[in-house]
Image (cartoon, rainbow, N blue to C red):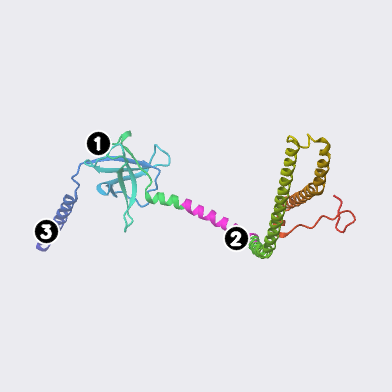
Amino acid sequence: MENKSHALAAGLFVVFVTALLIALAVWLTRDTRQLRNYELSGPVNLSGLQPQASVRYQGVPVGKVTSISLDSQTRGHVLVRIAVDDLAPISASTFATLGYQGVTGLAFIQLDDSEPRNGATTPLAQLSDNSRIPLKPGLVSKLTDRGERVLGQLDEASQRLTQLLSIQNQQTLMTTVDNFGKAALEIQHLAAQTRTLLPEAAQGVRNSLASLKATSLRLGDSADAARTSARAFQQLTERMAAPGGALDQLGQGSEVWVATNHILQSVTLPRLNLVAQDVARSTRQLGELVQTLRDAPQALLLGAPAPVPGPGEPGFSVP
């Protein structure tokens, strides 16, 4: 009987100590802060977020998540209820995002303000239509959405690259490279021919310039002769018009006229004829040279082109 009483006392003592420890733990871990309830709503994927998760304002713990559910007011939105310290500066510009801890990967609610606050803020009302804080996609959600778009673009780019590197396009590319090589060889041959023909063309130009120079010298001599004849004729005219000259002595002037006519026929007119022939020849040569260069400018480098065959000649074709 005494053993049973001792056992009962020991059991009661253990239960009392256990209850005391539980009460002490609850008392030590109790949250004495005054909390304010808010609702978060938005089209966000809440994978990894659990009730009792931490709520942080700019990285500082200010509350916890109380419940997670679907928003019955807006289709496709989720509804998260949070309890936040009354001292947290929650205002109308506050918004929420989903954050993740670096090592553990546990999700938490991150609160932030879209506008800087100067002075006191106007807190939101509790559990009313105006107390909802917008829940926006976080960095991970944005990276996921953009990653899907980037993967789609990479897939499209790979398909286009596959089409670009098809067998037909490869053959076309190789043909283009061969054509480039042939064009380079033709340009090299043309450059060699040009280097060969340039001295001949330069010599032809020098010969033409020398001919033009000689013609200009002959024209100058002819002009000097014409000026000499004009001066002689002028002197003769002055002598004829002078008092006591040929006009006064008309009978004796016939002999002077015969002498003058002889001078004109024997000296001046042959020289004028030679000058006119030289001028006509030079003009014709210049005209032929200009016409040749106008019809075939390459004749300056390649020489004069072959004449077009006429009727009855080999190679003649009826236009």
Foreground label between 2 and 1: 2
Distance from Cα at disc 2 to Cα at disc 1: 62 Å
Residue 260 is marked as none
Q: Secondary structure at mark 2?
A: loop
Q: Residues within 10 Å of mark 3 (few under 14, many from 20)?
A: few
Q: Earlier in the sequence, mark 2 or mark 3?
A: 3
Q: Nearer the viewer, residue 72 or 20?
A: 72
Magenta: predominant secondary structure element? helix
- In the image, residue 41 above or below residue 11: above
Q: Earlier in the sequence, mark 3 or mark 1?
A: 3
Location of residue 220 in the rendering, given as x and y in whole percent from the top left corner: 70, 50
For image coordinates 48% across by 50% down, the residue present is: 149
From the viewer's perspective, is 55 left or right of 72? left
From the viewer's perspective, is 314 left or right of 116? right
Query: Which residue was labeled with disc 1?
Result: 121
Q: Does the rendering let one see residue 198? A: yes
Distance from Cα at disc 3 to Cα at disc 1: 59 Å
The boundaries of the magenta stretch are 148-169
Reply yes or no: does residue 166 show up in magenta. Answer: yes
Query: Which residue was labeled with disc 2?
Result: 165
Q: Residues within 10 Å of mark 1 (few under 14, many from 20)?
A: few
Residue 9 is marked as 3
